[in-house]
Image: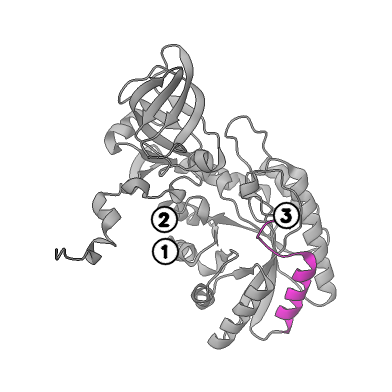
Amino acid sequence: MINFQELAEKYKTPLYVYDFDYMKEQYNALKEAFRGRKSLLSYAVKANSNLSVVQNFARLGSGADCVSIGEVRRALMAGIPPYKILFSGVGKQDDEIQEAIEHDILYINAESIAELERIDLIAKKLDKVCRISVRVNPNIDPKTHPYISTGLSANKFGVDIDSAKRMYIFAKNSSHLDPVGIHFHIGSQLTELEPIRESAIIVADLVRSLHVIDVDLKFFDIGGGLGVVYKDEITITPYDYAQAILSTLTGLDLTIVCEPGRYLTANAGYFLTRVLYEKTNKDKRFIIVDGAMNDLIRPSLYNAYHKIEALKQEGERTKADIVGPVCESGDFFAKDYELPALAHNDLLIVHSAGSYGFGMGSNYNTRGRSAEIAIENGVDRMIRQRETFEDIIALEKDFLQENNE
């Protein structure tokens, strides 16, 4: 059991707390599901990019799925070898592509014909051969939130089947490109198996058609997106997930690449925040806390649900909006959420905060971002210190002009 009260007193609030042992259990469960087949789990760094979190997975043998050169650098710094690093994303800049090639990472996921041509040009200038994969958009509805849907033709990610074929032919004919993989990722927080299976069927058939024209791929990258329980979701088991994928690969000798993020970290994380005040506007109850949308923006951005627990449980529970100090009406963690009467300094625990929490944070309203704490084998340690005002202004203060008035 994590002693949240003790942690809040020791490290102050707002505070992120991560259970590293839970992350390991999730990783091992997914790895076990693909046992018997060649596979690589590549942690999706964007889910939680803290260096110690990435290092935790590196020690388990994980690779890294990165969507910026900054994430590639984080992965390398955390101990993930280049041959386990993938570089995805629709808007890679020339210097990012160049650096990825120079690091000799496993492959770059190309998301458009134009991007593949840039990769070819840059590899040629470097006189190197770049391993690539093509991100295919199977045009399957993932049945998830529209902001985290990525597998439809209306989404910005990937290319259609015909475009993918042309890209593979282009890569095959280039002396500076090595087409080694194929990639698809239809969205995040997936809770239905059939869209995943349908997508895998489409992409596996494309692999077979490419084999006919002597494009022999080695990696079948199924992306990530496995859903987790925030409230009452019925989720997919790792075994069922793996079997759905494997059933589509009959006759194909491919290494399966999986890019879990939320599945590994979401329910390993907690966000601690203290009550500042309670107030009532006519019949509307507000609980004002020291955390804000700059710390955890998911409720504001996605209207996302997070379980919120008050350590003080006594008294009748009534509906309240849990809101922060930021000067925006969109600054809330929950609306009409039932909680008991609370007083100054009472502690609230926001659950399922290990993914897309701190990483999507900001300094809006000149608020320093929270500290981050790891719990491993019952021992807590700081893995990122709380930002100070001096940290926030460090890149600005030297440019102040003297007042000559």
Amino acid beneath label 1: Met
Left or right for 212, reference 284: right
Q: Would you name the residue on which mark 3 appears?
A: 152
Left or right for 94, reference 315: right
Q: What's the magenta region? A: 152-173
Q: Which of marks 3 and 2 is in front?
A: 3
Give the secondary structure at mark 1: helix
**Residues under numbered marks 1 and 2 in contact, where contact means CB atoms less than 8 Å apart:** yes
First in sequence: mark 3 vs mark 1: 1
Amino acid beneath label 3: Leu
**Residue 159 lies within the magenta run:** yes
Q: At 55% from the left edge and 69% from the top edge, which residue is drawn?
A: 92
Quadrant of the rendered structure where residue 118 is? bottom right
**Residue 214 lies within the magenta run:** no
Quadrant of the rendered structure where residue 16 is? top left
User: Can you give x and y, in whole percent of width and height, for residue 369 in the image?
Assistant: 35, 47
The dot on residue 51 is 2
Q: Would you name the residue on which mark 1 appears?
A: 77
Give the secondary structure at mark 2: helix
Q: At 52% from the left edge and 33% from the top edge, which residue is drawn?
A: 306
Residue density around tag 1, few if under 14, some if 14–19, many if 20 or more, within 10 Å: few
Q: Nearer the viewer, mark 3 or mark 1?
A: 3
Amino acid beneath label 2: Leu
Left or right for 76, reference 257: left
